[in-house]
Image (spheres, rainbow, N blue to C red):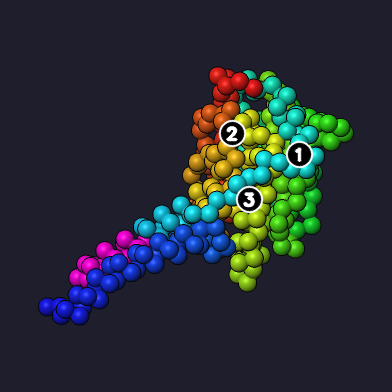
Amino acid sequence: MTTPRQQWSMAAAIVAIPTLALTMGALSANQPIGVLLAMAEPLLFATLMTVVAVTLLHLRHGMAAVILTSAVVGTVALHLPTEHHQPTGDGPQWLRVLRGCALLSKPAKAPVRLLTWTIDDSVGVEQSMERFLELQPDIIVINGTDDPAVGSRLGAALNGEVKFFPSDSTAGGMTAVVRGSFQYCGGDDDHWTMPLPSAQNGGGQGLITFPHVQDVGVFPLIITRLDTPSGINDWMEWGHHVISGAKDIADAASVIGTRKMVLMGDLQIPARSAPLATSIGKTGLRPIHSEPNWPTQVLGAPFLPLHARDQAWVGSGWHVQAARVLPSEGQIRAPIVFDLVPDTSKAP
């Protein structure tokens, strides 16, 4: 039988603990700690459910309810923060020039298939390449390599143009391939580099292009890779770079215009995370939801993927038809294929 003091303590816990979880979740959402919590969310959830189960086994029903309620309200607060980044809608002259090209490009007139994949360049990708090339993607973005052999193989398979973007970072270079060609805009350039916040070896990078897909059309494409964490001591700095990088991408996308835009690449954290949802999500781009593609293995053993770190976001001029995670051989991430259909009902 509980004493009045114990009853008062339980009542205080019922109010205080969920309130604390709500406050901490809201305050952490757009902070580096929120980035880390978003990545750890599946493991934290499993841990909390274990704690709840143990508490119930000890017949502590009230405490189990408090823990469960706190977990729910804390998670909701983490994904519904009070702070939002408002894209500028204005920017440097070179971005305004690209806006003109985006507005003048004719809407796509046929479905398009995209593939994005982040790889470890030290591990072979031939078997996985053969599998996804059978799907005949129209655009392929591979983060982690600028190997001419890989790019040439992909370019020949798509009968299109290949772009290599070298990098001095440990994250490796980038390769982009289109079944067609990359178009020029306002001069002699057919791609534009946008440096993103990054540690010395993190490799944060953004690229803007206008791919012309044969029999489909031209549309603005942002290829991105947010900063890559280099070690446990740098996790907080990495969180800062992810948040700042997402804001930079949002600002650039807002200037160019997002209706016909596609954004794809390695965004590092789940699309539902506050740093992405409250910045990129405010531009008119929306994420294409897919099954998780990371990690497919841990220490060489198969593992249940937890997050889709490689993503695609699209503007209102596109309908999403499908998103599929493909098998991969030896890589810690799996490639993801996205099928889009242009919304021909919308004006240019």
Total labels: the figure holds 3
Decide: few, some or many residues near mark 3? Use Cα within 10 Å; few <14, some 14-19, many ≥20.
Answer: many
**Disc 3, SS:** helix
Cα distance between the residues tagged 3 and 2? 16 Å
**Viewer-proximal residue, 326 or 288?**
288
Instruction: Locate residue 49: give its quadrant.
Output: bottom left
Looking at the image, tell me whether mark 3 or mark 2 is earlier in sequence order.
Answer: 3
Query: Could you tell me the amino acid type at mark 3?
Result: Ala
At x 20%, y 80%, the residue is 5
**Looking at the figure, which quarter contains the C terminus?**
top right
Which numbered dot is residue 315? 2
Query: Could you tell me the amino acid type at mark 2?
Result: Gly
Q: Which residues are magenta?
A: 56-71
Looking at the image, tell me whether mark 3 or mark 1 is earlier in sequence order.
Answer: 1
Query: Could you tell me the amino acid type at mark 1?
Result: Leu
Task: Residue 313: tell me if it is visible.
Answer: no
Cα distance between the residues tagged 3 and 1? 17 Å
**Viewer-proximal residue, 233 or 175?**
233
**Looking at the figure, which quarter contains the N terminus?**
bottom left
Looking at the image, tell me whether mark 2 or mark 1 is earlier in sequence order.
Answer: 1
Task: Residue 84: tell me if it is visible.
Answer: yes
**Disc 1, SS:** helix
Residue labelled with disc 3: 246
**Viewer-proximal residue, 171 or 194?**
194
Residue furthest to the left: 1
Residue labelled with disc 1: 95
**Viewer-proximal residue, 101 or 19?**
19
At x 79%, y 50%, the residue is 166
At x 45%, y 61%, the residue is 25
